[in-house]
């Protein structure tokens, strides 16, 4: 077993020994959802004051409004009663460091992990590669405020999203922990 696997299983045993959350209802108690990035520096429970059972947290690379993220938000509303949504991106995001073309080129030469340095992204040139790494829109980010606004608008314009759900747009600052509103995004998400 790997060290990581051992650490996770040990932590779970300790957590389960004092577990007292088995009676929480399935719908989130505070009736809201957050779409945010998977970056390990973000802890939505801390920056949004959440406890288990409070809110749905949907995470992906960049906190982008992909089809799957919108699917999750619609389920969150339709079946589990959320009434407000947040789109929260963050400063110093890895999704700002490459483009769709760079990702496609890296995948076309290898499926191994790439590396980055001052000169940009480099592939290991090992392994079988991918015949077409350009088949996905990677939803990279050029400008955080613009991407938050685009994501709020993409959610708002989806025909499965009710117009009475407010969608708020924010950027989390990884240097000071503050949430910074993107006024254009929040305006676009107004119910």
Image: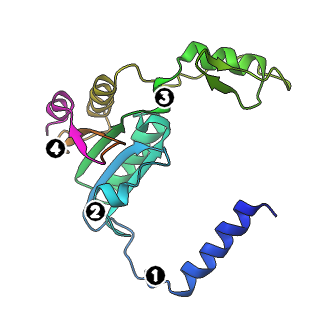
Label 1, label 2: how many angstroms apart (C-alpha)?
A: 21 Å
Quick one: label 1, few (<14), some, or many (20+) residues within 10 Å? few
Crowd rating for badge 3 (residues with CA inside 10 Å; few <14, some 14–19, many 20+) = some
128 versus 182 height, above or below: above
Q: Which residue is mark 1?
A: 22
Look at 15% across and 31% down and name the residue there.
183
Camera-nearest label, 3 or 4: 3
In the depicted structure, whether residue 58 falls above or below residue 183: below
Task: For marks 1 and 4, give the CA distance.
Answer: 32 Å
> Which of the 4 quarters of the picture holds residue 29?
bottom left
Q: Earlier in the sequence, mark 1 or mark 3?
A: 1
- Image quadrant assignment for residue 24: bottom left
Q: Is residue 75 left or right of residue 189?
A: right
Q: Is residue 177 visible?
A: yes
Q: Marks 1/3: CA distance? A: 36 Å
How packed is label 4: few (under 14 Cα within 10 Å), some, or many (20 or more)? few
- The residue at the point 35 percent across, 42 percent down is 175
Q: Earlier in the sequence, mark 4 or mark 2?
A: 2
Relative image position of residue 148 (x, y in whole percent)? 30, 30
Which region of the structure is painted magenta?
A: 177-191
Report which residue position mark 4 lands on.
164
Label 1–label 4 contact, CB within 8 A: no
Element assignment for label 1: loop
* Disc 3: which residue: 95
């Amino acid at each position: 077993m790997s060290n990581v696997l051992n650490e996770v299983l040990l932590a779970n045993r300790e957590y389960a020994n004092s577990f007292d959350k088995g009676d929480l209802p399935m719908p989130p108690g505070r009736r809201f959802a957050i779409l945010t990035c998977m970056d390990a520096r973000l802890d939505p429970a801390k920056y949004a004051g959440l406890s288990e059972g409070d809110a749905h947290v949907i995470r992906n690379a960049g906190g982008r409004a992909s089809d799957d993220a919108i699917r999750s938000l619609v389920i969150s509303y339709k079946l589990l009663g959320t009434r407000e949504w947040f789109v929260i991106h963050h400063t110093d995001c890895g999704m700002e460091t490459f483009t769709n073309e760079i990702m496609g080129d890296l995948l076309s030469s290898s499926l191994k992990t790439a590396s980055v340095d001052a000169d940009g992204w480099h592939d290991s040139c090992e392994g079988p590669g991918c015949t077409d790494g350009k088949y996905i829109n990677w939803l990279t980010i050029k400008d955080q405020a613009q991407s938050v606004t685009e994501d709020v608008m993409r959610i708002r314009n989806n025909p499965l999203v009710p117009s009475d759900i407010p969608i708020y747009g924010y950027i989390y600052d990884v240097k000071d922990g503050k949430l910074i509103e993107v006024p254009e995004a929040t305006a676009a998400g107004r119910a």
